[in-house]
Image (cartoon, helix red, strand yellow):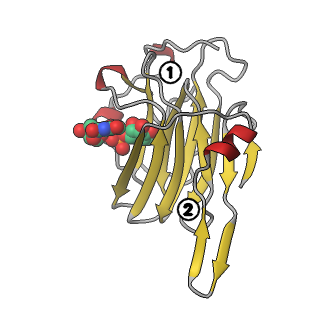
C-alpha cells in the first residue's frame, strides 16, 4: 500500500499493492495497521456505495458538521470519477482550496478525505459505482453542502457541461454563505 500526501495537508492518495495471478488479482483496500503506520488512525463505522448511470453526474460538495463530521475513504469500483476534496476548516492555510484526482476501477486509487473537508465527484463514464468508508454514522441533521461550481473555490471539473445534480445540490449555498463549524 503506497500513501502519498497531497498538496492539501491531511488528504492522502492511497494505492494498493495488487497481486495478480492466473485467476485475476487480489488487493487489500483497507488495513488498520498500515494506515496506523502512516499516523492515520480511523474507526470506520459505515460503508456506502452509490451508482450513477449518466456520464457527467455530479454528487457534492458534501460534508457533515460537527459533532458528526466524517472522514471518508473513497474508491471507484466501476467506471471513472474525478474526485474532489475542499478544505473548509476556518483558519486553515488551505481554506477554500481543492484537490482533485481521477479514481477508477482500473487505477484502483483511493482518496482519504478527513473531517473538515467537503467532498464531491463527477462521473467521467456511464454506469459508475463508488464505494467509501466513513468514520461517523449518517446524521441528516448535520448534513451540509456547498455549490459545486462556487467561483471562489474554482474547481476545474474535467467535463465542461451542466452536470446531472440532485435537487439539493442544485441549490446548495456558496462557501461564503455556508454554515460551517470546523476549525483548524
Ligand atoms: C449519505 C447518506 C444518504 N442516505 C440517504 C438520504 C437520501 O434519501 C438518499 C440519497 O442521499 P444523497 O442525495 O445525499 O446521496 P449522495 O448525493 O450520493 O451523497 C453522498 O455524496 C458524496 C459526495 C459524499 O461525500 C457522501 O458523504 C454523501 O453525501 O440516501 C442515507 O440513508 N445514508 C447516508 O449515509
Measured from the top left, where is residue 175 in percent x and y?
Answer: 50, 21
| C-alpha gap between disc 2 and disc 1 | 28 Å
SS at badge 1: helix
> Disc 2 or 1, which lies upstream in sequence?
2
Residue bearing the label numbered 1: 175
Q: Nearer the viewer, residue 174 or 61?
A: 61
Relative to 140, residue 133 above or below:
below
- Pair 2/1: label in front: 2
Q: Quadrant of residue 18?
A: bottom right
SS at badge 2: strand
- Ligand 1: quadrant of the figure: top left
Residue bearing the label numbered 2: 104
Measured from the top left, where is residue 11 in percent x and y?
Answer: 66, 36
Q: Residue at x 68, y 17 (%)?
A: 92
Q: Nearer the viewer, residue 158 or 118?
A: 118
Residue 153 seen from this side: no
Relative to 132, residue 36 above or below:
above
Q: Are marks 2 and 1 in contact (CB under 8 Å)?
A: no
Relative to 43, residue 95 above or below:
above
Relative to 83, residue 81 above or below:
below
Measured from the top left, where is residue 137 in percent x and y?
Answer: 38, 31
Residue placed furthest toward the bottom = 22
Q: How many marks?
A: 2
Measured from the top left, where is residue 15 in percent x and y?
Answer: 68, 56
Residue placed furthest toward the front = 33
Q: Residue at x 51, y 15 (%)?
A: 176
Amino acid at each position: 500500500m503506497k500513501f502519498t500526501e497531497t498538496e492539501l495537508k491531511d488528504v492522502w492518495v492511497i494505492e494498493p499493492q495488487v497481486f495478480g495471478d492466473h485467476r485475476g488479482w487480489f488487493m487489500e483496500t483497507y488495513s488498520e495497521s498500515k494506515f496506523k503506520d502512516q499516523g492515520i488512525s480511523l474507526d470506520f463505522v459505515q460503508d456506502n456505495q452509490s451508482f450513477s448511470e449518466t456520464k457527467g453526474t455530479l454528487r457534492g460538495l458534501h460534508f457533515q458538521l460537527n459533532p458528526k463530521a466524517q472522514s471518508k475513504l473513497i474508491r471507484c469500483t466501476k467506471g471513472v470519477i474525478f474526485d474532489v476534496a475542499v478544505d473548509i476548516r476556518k483558519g486553515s492555510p488551505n481554506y477554500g482550496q481543492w484537490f482533485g484526482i481521477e479514481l477508477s476501477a482500473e487505477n484502483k486509487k483511493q482518496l482519504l478525505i478527513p473531517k473538515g473537508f467537503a467532498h464531491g465527484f463527477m462521473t467521467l463514464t456511464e454506469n459508475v459505482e463508488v464505494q467509501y468508508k466513513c468514520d461517523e454514522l449518517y446524521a441528516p441533521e448535520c448534513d451540509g453542502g456547498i455549490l459545486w461550481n462556487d467561483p471562489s473555490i474554482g474547481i476545474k471539473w474535467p467535463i465542461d457541461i451542466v452536470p446531472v445534480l440532485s435537487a439539493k445540490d442544485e441549490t446548495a449555498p456558496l462557501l461564503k454563505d455556508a454554515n460551517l463549524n470546523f476549525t483548524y
